[in-house]
């Protein structure tokens, strides 16, 4: 079975606070709260394993909250080899209104600062683990202390070891990482718009944008632009696909993009076509959106939604 190595440089404990209705500049009574491990690579690994894949997760963890993340990762069946850092792993907060159909309010911390020695230790771990990986997936924000070209360095290491690479980041971290020409990127429409300098209002524009992004990737690369409830667009060197997500009642979009990627990459690494892999990704993203934001989609739900995820070649 092909192994997927995920790298999460700035993981978190995600705490979701549920209120009846969010009152700005007023007192809000929390009806319940839930906690889960967070981070793009971590969620990707968990979904990949959930649907039958093999994945190892690495990155930085520290303190009590770092142990909370590690426990959640191992409970999901993901292999883990994180670098322990001196500072505490960050905690992010999501505030969800149970009486309003509105996106959650998210408060993200900067994260634990890392030292040069801790960074060098992670580089050594990635050097070793990527030798046995078919794909190395990385993304999310950079923690304080990480080099500006952190993703570029890690992409180069993985590709020198024969692995294909995925980068899912935003802003300067994404721009710097693209210099190393990864094999796959997955910006959402807003992130792609920031990369290209124009708005992406519909799937047709997204298809054109995805092909423009292909020029920044490794030969034979793929650009996947997620469009939320509208689905996703996938550009390959010889084909373009527009995918439509299953029609669901979404409770939270937190982790949906990571779930899309986890299922897509797992199926792709197992030999499925990009079209089939995208269908699985759309189903997984929808399954996670049906949860309350502190969970990921489960295999039975993903399989049940698979028939409603459609992909067409354009």
Image (cartoon, rainbow, N blue to C red):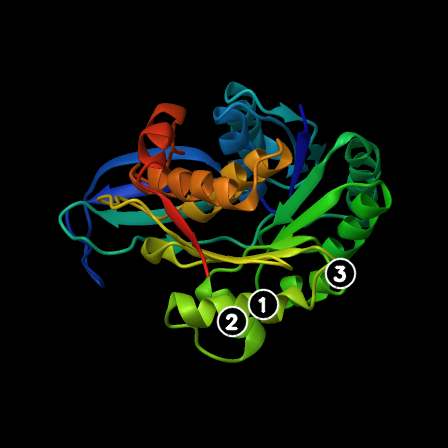
Q: Nearer the viewer, mark 2 or mark 3?
A: 2
Quarter occupied by residue 53: top right
Residue located 51% across and 19% down the image: 75
Q: Which of these two is toward me, 189 or 78? A: 189
Find residue 71 and report its horizontal and vertical position in percent: 54, 23
Label 3 residue SS: loop
Circle 3 packing at 10 Å, graded few (<14), some (14-19), many (20+), is some
Label 2 residue SS: helix
Q: Nearer the viewer, mark 1 or mark 3?
A: 1
Find residue 29 and report its horizontal and vertical position in percent: 18, 45
Residue 267, placed above or below residue 109: above
Identify the residue position indicated by label 3 in the image: 149
Q: Is residue 119 visible from the viewing direction of this image?
A: yes
Q: Which of these two is toward me, 102 or 70? A: 102
Q: Earlier in the sequence, mark 1 or mark 3?
A: 3
Q: Which of these two is toward me, 313 or 265? A: 313
Quarter occupied by residue 306: top left
Asked if disc 2 and disc 3 are in contact, CB closer than 8 Å, the reply is no
Residue located 25% across and 46% down the image: 247
Q: Earlier in the sequence, mark 2 or mark 3?
A: 3
Asked if disc 1 and disc 2 are in contact, CB closer than 8 Å, the reply is yes
Identify the residue position indicated by label 1 in the image: 211
Residue 49, placed above or below residue 275: above
Q: CA distance from mark 1 to mark 2?
A: 5 Å
Identify the residue position indicated by label 2 in the image: 208
Find residue 103 and report its horizontal and vertical position in percent: 28, 55
Find residue 36 and report its horizontal and vertical position in percent: 43, 33
Q: CA distance from mark 1 to mark 3?
A: 24 Å
Label 1 residue SS: helix
Indicate which disc residue 63 carries. Answer: none
């Amino acid at each position: 079975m092909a192994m997927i190595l995920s790298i999460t440089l700035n993981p978190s404990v995600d705490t979701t606070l549920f209120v009846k209705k969010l009152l700005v500049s007023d007192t809000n009574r929390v009806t319940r709260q839930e906690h889960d491990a967070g981070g793009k690579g971590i969620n990707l690994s968990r979904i990949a394993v959930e649907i039958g894949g093999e994945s190892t997760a690495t990155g930085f963890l520290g303190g009590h909250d770092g142990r909370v993340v590690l426990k959640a990762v191992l409970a999901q069946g993901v292999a883990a080899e994180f670098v322990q850092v001196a500072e505490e792993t960050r905690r992010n907060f999501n505030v969800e209104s149970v009486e309003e159909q509105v996106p959650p309010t998210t408060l993200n911390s900067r994260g634990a600062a890392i030292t040069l020695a801790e960074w060098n230790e992670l580089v050594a771990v990635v050097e070793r683990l990527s030798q046995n990986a078919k794909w190395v997936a990385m993304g999310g924000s950079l923690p304080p202390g990480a080099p500006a070209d952190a993703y570029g360095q890690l992409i180069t290491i993985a590709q020198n070891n024969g692995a294909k690479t995925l980068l899912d980041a935003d802003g300067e971290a994404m721009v710097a990482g693209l210099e190393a020409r990864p094999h796959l990127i997955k910006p959402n429409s807003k992130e792609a718009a920031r990369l290209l300098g124009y708005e992406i209002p519909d799937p047709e524009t997204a298809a054109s944008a995805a092909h423009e992004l292909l020029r920044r990737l490794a030969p034979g690369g793929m650009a996947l632009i997620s469009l939320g409830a509208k689905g996703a667009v996938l550009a390959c060197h010889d084909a373009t696909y527009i995918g439509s997500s299953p029609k669901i009642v979404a409770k939270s979009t937190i982790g949906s993009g990571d779930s899309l990627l986890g299922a897509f990459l797992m199926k792709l690494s197992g030999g499925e076509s990009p079209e089939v892999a995208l269908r699985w990704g759309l189903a997984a993203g929808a399954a996670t959106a049906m949860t309350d934001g502190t969970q990921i989609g489960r295999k039975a739900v993903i399989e049940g939604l698979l028939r409603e995820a459609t992909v067409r070649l354009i």
